[in-house]
Image (cartoon, rainbow, N blue to C red):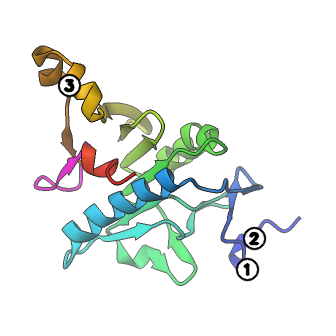
Amino acid sequence: MNTNLADQDCPAQELIGGKIVAMSPTATSHNRIAENIHFMFRTYLKGKRCVPLGNGYDLYLTDQDRFIPDFMVVCDRDKIKEKGVYGAPDLVVEVLSTGTARNDKWHKKNVYAASGVPEYWIVSPGDRFVEVYRLRDGGYALDNLYTHCSREEWEDLSPGERAAVVTEFKCHLYDDFVIRVDEIFSDW
């Protein structure tokens, strides 16, 4: 079996642990979330060194692993080649799908950590949360979990519970870029 996907036209397949894996068809909510994240970073990064890359870019990390993340930020532009990104991006985001959640939470997460990706986000459309992992001592540690409340859920919270809900955060790359959780999950 030829696992060199660089020479094949297979935009809907990834190489995971040496095996070709078809990507799940994405739902509208999955696509909107990925688009929202890309839009926020593209707007913020306009004119800056780092490049935001949405879904569709191949990411080559090992001989056995070629992923297509939902979103990534690459600050070393030399890593961006015609066929994809070669080497660890500075941020990777995977939006969970029913068929790919296991890979995103286990194998890909481990490969991203071993490859030196400093920050990894797992976004759940169904549960409306963002898990932010930071690279520490060669592995990922959960930095924080951010949850989006619907308007009805927000209204049902007590003032004390509302005060405890974190509604915005910053990625490690930028001290002045505030990411609002409701903007990640808006318009779907």
What is the x, y in percent for residue 13? Answer: 70, 63
Local crowd size for mark 1, using a 10 Å CA cut-off: few (<14), some (14–19), many (≥20): few
Q: Could you say which quadrant of the image residue 92 lies in?
A: bottom left
Q: Which residue is mark 3?
A: 155
Q: Which mark is residue 4?
A: 2
The tag earlier along the polypeptide, 1 or 3, is: 1
Disc 1 residue type (three-letter):
Asp
Placement of 57 over or under 31, stated as above or below: below
Q: Which mark is residue 7?
A: 1
In magenta, the rendered stretch is 172-181
Q: Nearer the viewer, mark 1 or mark 3?
A: 3
Q: Residue at x 21, y 76 (%)?
A: 46
Which element carries disc 2, helix, strand or loop? loop
Which element carries disc 1, helix, strand or loop? helix
CA separation in Å, label 2 and label 3: 52 Å
Q: Nearer the viewer, mark 2 or mark 3?
A: 3
